[in-house]
Amino acid sequence: MRRATLFVAVVVLLWLAWDTGADPVRLARGVPWILDFLRRMLPPDPSVLPAALAGALKTVEIALLGTTVAAVFALPLGFLSARNVAPTPVFYPARAVLNFFRSVDTLVYALVFVAAVGLGPFPGVLAVIAYTTTSLAKLYSEAIEGIDPGPVDAVTATGATRLQILRYGVLPQVLPLFLSYVLYRLESNIRAATVLGFVGAGGIGFYLQTYLRMIDYPAASTVLLVTVAMVMVVDTISSRLRERLV
Amino acid sequence: MIEVAGLRVVLPPAVRAVDGVDLTVGAGEFVVILGRSGSGKTTFLRAINRLVEPTAGSVRVAGRAVTGAGPAELRAARRQIGMVFQQFNLVRRASVLDNVLAGRLGYVPTLPSLLGRFPARDHDLALACLAQVGLAHLAGRRADTLSGGEQQRVAIARALAQAPSVILADEPTASLDPALTADIMGILKAINAERGLTLVVSQHQLETALAYATRIVGFRAGRVAFDGPPSAVTLAVAEAIYGAPA
């Protein structure tokens, strides 16, 4: 039985390699080209640094605004799709909506919103909101499902209304988790927002794509370095904040 | 004060946790429900304020129907029934004072309470309740920094803040050591004596029950196996309740 499973797995992997044209020899032949590419990127061109920094700032703005708005929008959705809080007739449709919208990535949303509202950072913000709202709602709902039912019983027993029970029995238990998820999403959204510029949705990705198209590799490498620095700075700040929440 | 008639609670899948209980508790009584774990004590108490939905029978508390009450009537009924739990059920991250203020939720207007605002007189009342259990000096501390015995006293203060006519206490000392057991039972006894509050307390320890109760109700397999004053509890009665020589 085990051998048969292993055999099937190997056959599937081989077929995948064949069908995607995965070929170690081709990769080995490409190595000189990669090296050539890297050599042409050096040294980075410092003259584009101001543009790169402006682009990075815009990317951070897109991620920050999009994530904050999504963090709020996700609140009602999160409660409505938590099994232990939402009434059953609400729970199933809410879960279905979440899973549907979560299956599309931020970049795809960006394409849609660029077509709808035109180029610039605004469609980027909308794309971040669209994806992050549903992915945070899913995380929220799982946090809500994991709460200790004891305080909820206690608050219910005081004669509190449904909303009061959520506010005093549920929210204090999940709020630190929610904030931690929001910061985590902010980190991933910074990374996601770097490529939003590729489809015209603003930020540092626009500069990267432009310089690559112009075959100006030294300028592109400056933009790449700024991107790496930006991601590292945001990750560091965010993970420090998250540590404090526990 | 409490009138229970023909109460039956069937828990899923088909456990008859409470199997036909008739019980009338007069004002100012200190009733201890005695029985082994699994005898239906907890389910019985939770059915009195409908944290568990009764399958059949009726419950009236302080002249109000609990069974058959609509949502608003049920909240009004719950308001006058304080409840204390084995695991304290405080909101661990909230302050001691906020936990006690939660006892006022049945009285205060919903909207300000959702924003965390309580009228000044409710603050005064909450502090007075904390003083009654000897913890006024810990009002600003986070609940989870308190010891188990202190947490249970905060839970009692929360129940007192409801200005209830009845307090139900479900195994309030089962998570505490013997010295703290005497402490907590003493506080409950003082509330009963000074305020004339009706108390229904479940216990699995015979000696503790006999030391504080004005009336003992023995539960066995979801039914009342004994009902009488502590002085009437003989070896034969203990056997009837516990099912083996005590």
Image (cartoon, coloured by chain):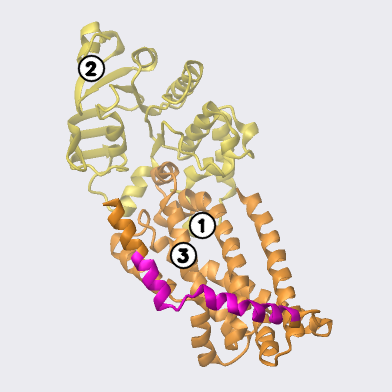
Chain colours: A orange, B yellow
Instruction: Identify residue type, mark 2.
Output: Ile
Residue lying at 60% horizontally and 79% vertically, measured from the top left: A30
Q: Give the range drawn in magenta.
A: A11-39
Q: Distance of mark 3 from mark 1, alpha carbons?
A: 21 Å
In the picture, the disc for residue A135 is none
Foreground pick, A219 / B96:
A219
- Tell whether label 1 touches label 2 (CB within 8 Å): no
Nearer the observer, disc 3 or disc 2? 3
Q: What residue type is labelled 1?
A: Leu
The relative height of residue A229 versus residue B26 in the rendered view (above or below) is below
Write down the residue under mark 3.
A137
**Disc 1 packing (10 Å; few <14; some 14–19; many ≥20):** some
Q: Is residue B139 visible?
A: yes
Evaluate if marks 3 and 2 touch, with contact meaning CB atoms under 8 Å apart.
no
| Whether residue A99 is situated above or below residue A33 in the rendered picture | above
Dot 2 or dot 1: first in sequence order is 1
In terms of secondary structure, where does tag 3 sit? helix
C-alpha separation, residue under disc 2 versus residue under disc 1: 46 Å
Residue holding disc 1: B114
**Residue B197 coordinates in the image, percent (x, y):** 40, 28
| Up-down relation of residue A176 to residue B16 (above or below) | below
x and y percent of residue B223 in the render?
18, 26
> Mark 2: which secondary structure?
helix
Image-quadrant location for residue B167: top left
Q: Mark 2 lies on which chain?
A: B
- Asked if labels 3 and 1 share a chain, the reply is no
List the single residue furthest toward the top: B235
Q: Name the residue under label 2.
A: B241
- Most foreground residue, A49 or A122: A49
